[in-house]
Image (tube, rainbow, N blue to C red):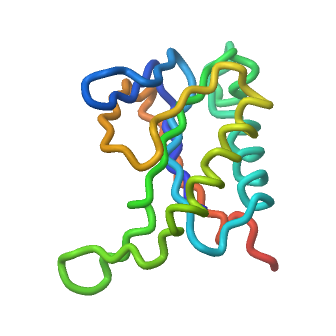
Amino acid sequence: MKIVLQRVKEARVTVEGETVGSIGAGFLLLLGVCDEDTEEVTDRMIDKVCRLRIFRDENGKTNRSLADVGGGLLVVSQFTLYADCSQGNRPSFIRAGGPQLAEKLYEHALERCRSYVPETEHGVFGAEMEVSLVNDGPFTLVLDSDTLFKKK
């Protein structure tokens, strides 16, 4: 599983001109699933995201979590995070999880997010979406389950 996490002042996702999810300060999560992903991997990734301390404290240090600041989450499915651009000029998406698995794990991720953050909004799985955000910092992290949870 891959997640691109952006600390935002606000973010929203629109489908066919209608806003389907929006938040104020918090995290925008772009979430990509591969065929090897499981509910356990999803839980570990969401737990990591929701516990990250990347908001500024009273001293300006990144020491506060999403819960500490009462932030929201906007989660958007993003299969293109598994694009392989190593050959030619047209990306291959062979590593991206199939739609059935990806939607199941996306829905599971949303449930897990809601257990941490009451204000969890989302896009529409498989839809053509427009995502707007005001990045705070900018502060963007890329989390990959293959490297985060690799056995040593």
Q: Which residue is drawn at 64% across and 45% down?
A: 107
Query: In the image shown, does 32 or 52 lie closer to the viewer?
Result: 32
Q: In the displayed structure, would residue 39 be above or below residue 97?
A: above
Q: In the displayed structure, would residue 101 be above or below residue 36?
A: above
Which residue extends farthest front?
100
Task: Measuring from the top left, give residue 102's x and y in whole percent.
Answer: 56, 59
- Image position of 112 (left or right of 104): right
Which quarter of the rendered picture does the C terminus lie within? bottom right
Query: In the image shown, does 98 or 75 lie closer to the viewer?
Result: 98
Task: Measuring from the top left, give residue 10's x and y in whole percent.
Answer: 44, 19
Give residue 105's quadrant in the image. Answer: bottom right
Q: In the displayed structure, would residue 85 be above or below residue 54?
A: below
Task: Measuring from the top left, give residue 94's x and y in whole percent.
Answer: 42, 78
State the count of labels: 0
Which quarter of the rendered picture does the N terminus lie within? bottom right
Task: Measuring from the top left, give residue 108's x and y in whole percent.
Answer: 70, 47
Query: In the image shown, does 93 or 67 lie closer to the viewer?
Result: 93
Which residue extends farthest left?
89
Q: Which residue is drawn at 46% across and 35% down?
A: 123
Give residue 46's quadrant in the image. Answer: top right
Q: Residue at x 34, y 34 (%)?
A: 131
Q: Which residue is drawn at 26% across and 30% down?
A: 16
